[in-house]
Amino acid sequence: MKKIIFSLILLIGIAIKGLAQDRQVEKLEPDNLKQELAMARHDTTRVLIMVDLCTIYRLSDPDSALYYGQQALTLAKKIRFPKGELLALSFQSFVVTSIGNLPRSLEMGLKALQLAEGNQLQEHTTPTLNNIGGIYRTLGDLPKALTYFKQQMIVGAILSNKSGLAYSELAIGGIFLEMNQLDSSAYYLKKSLEHFNSLDRVEPHVFTGLGDMEMKSGNTSLALDYYRKSLTLSIQYDEPTRTSSTYNSISGLYKIIDQRDSSIYYAKKGLATAQLTSQIEVVGKAASLLSELYEATDAKEALRYYKIATAAKDSLLGSASIQAVQLIVAQEQERQKEMELTKIAFQNQVKQYAALAGLVFFLLVAFILYRNNRQKQKANGLLQQQKEEIDMQRNKAEKSLDKLQSTQAQLIQSEKMASLGELTAGIAHEIQNPLNFVNNFSEINKDLLDELKGLRLKRKEESPPGRSDRTGDEQAETDLLKDIEDNEQKILQHGKRADAIVKGMLQHSQKSSGVKEPTDINLLAEEYYRLAYHSFKAKEKFPIEIKLIIDFDANLPLVNIIPQDIGRVLLNLYNNAFWACKIKSEGVTSESPLHFINYHPAVNLSTKKHPNKIEIRILDNGPGISQNIIDKIFQPFFTTKPTGQGTGLGLSLSYDIVNAHGGDLTVKSVVGERTEFIISLPTQNVQS
């Protein structure tokens, strides 16, 4: 994203040229422009000057840039100056992108393209096309980004605009680099460099792109040379946006070659420079680098930078931002579809009028009536063809929306997988305790065996020939063997505990390989219900029978699920229900309240179809769960069971599985009376 922002900023000169008497915006001073603004007599001139001020402030003062851009837009609308509106929207969108508001920037860019289409101003669309391409690049939709960059290149080629060509080729080279198509990336980056050279212009951004390419190719020395050249030029041209991103690139290079101090130095430089100009994405990358670099040596600093990186990421690619972008894209697709339908309707109306006129004109001649009939048939064929084209366009629009939704799901999944790093610390802590027991008892057993060998040797040396009184020594040996046997039992117990933790972790982190299929929920729930109960009775040796009550909805339709995954959820919930009944039964004494003394353990299993969902309810009459525990019950490694009897991963894993099916897992409980878990599956999973 940082590369796209910088490219967009430098493209501003293309749109300004011809609208302000070849004014060199980059060389103008804000104070001079403000004086010109105060003296300007014509509103169109005022609009262009305010656009210039927006452009100049874009790197140093985003608030001022947005202020002048909005003033220019308001005045351009008032005087009906489409060029001014287009430029004001384009330049504001650059600033909005840089501060991380992607939905607003995309909205402005699309509005600018609409103005260009409606007023024949396509020659001014190259910056906007580049900006929109950069937004899709940040969202991870590289093919869509490539489409806009190629449109920019086409416009530049038509207008013989070498500067526009150079920046579009630079952006395309960056896209191919992200796609790991190094040959294509090298081709476009070199073409971009040739065009900049033909303009007698030295562009720092090209050298950053070449450095990135060499980094991916494994040529770190050559990459560093390119980065240093880019950094020197960026500082020389006073381009803090380019400077901050180049600092980050150098930091990443030093991290790869394991020069940690240098990497930290340049990452801090990149972060400080990016914060001065509110470059959200560059701030996030620098903070993320620093968090990784400090992780092994300074946890406090690592956490501080991790929070900065997370805040930047949420600001740029949070769920609200993604949803807003999806809405804007859907609205744009709907607008394009409506425009196409309006165009087709107009064409159809014209053709219908022509057909009717022809029909009236040729009513007197039978031959002409015949010809008219043929024309009408052709018109109907054309209408059918157009209808099919509309259907194709609708399908394309739906596929585009599905792709965007898929991108959102991938981002959410990426954030979820990132949280596994936090789980690792908990897993390591949980595994360390049983492993310490295993190691300690193993060492004790070794010492005990050495002691036993010593006793036997001593006894052999000290015992007189023919003497058989070894009762004391035999008792000592028996005691040692008993200690060894106890230790081995503890080693086995804690080893199994460590194995359960590891297996639970693997289940929690691995993706399901199952395939969804229409499933009878009643049959599945009862099958696992019986399996779990018999397994519990055999394992726990529970002397009291648990009453099983089943209440299934006979009209429940088939549900499209992964049976083994939902079965795993049901097993976890059944085992928890049986465990709760066991705990409450063991706690009943003659001094317990009356309703406890008369306690009869029972578990209810029921299913029910609602208008928009299907529910599976598992209710036990155990001791219940307090609210402070309910708040944490789905967290990984949280358990109320005694040490060694639970890993704390069952409910967390169950919650993730149900969510992956588009459903929800909730819990209700009354302390001392009951606990009920509710699995909800939405109606879109139901097969009619």
Image (spheres, rainbow, N blue to C red):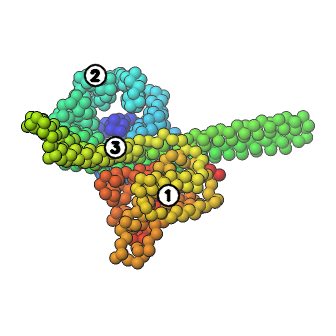
Q: Residue 248: horizontal and vertical position, in percent?
A: 25, 36
Residue assigned mark 1: 679
Q: Residue 409: horizontal and vertical position, in percent?
A: 45, 45
Q: Give the distance between the C-alpha atoms of the residues marked 3 and 2, in whole angstroms.
A: 44 Å
* Lower position in the chain sequence, tag 3 or tag 2: 2
Residue assigned mark 3: 499
**Residue 153 showing in the rendered view:** yes
Q: Please name the residue shown 40% across and 44% down the image.
A: 507
**Residue 65 showing in the rendered view:** no
Q: Is residue 489 left or right of residue 579?
A: left
Q: Give the distance between the C-alpha atoms of the residues marked 2 and 1, in whole angstroms.
A: 54 Å
Q: Residue 228: horizontal and vertical position, in percent?
A: 22, 28
Residue assigned mark 2: 219
Residue type marked 2 = Asn
223 lies above or below 611: above
Labels in figure, total: 3
Residue type marked 1 = Ile
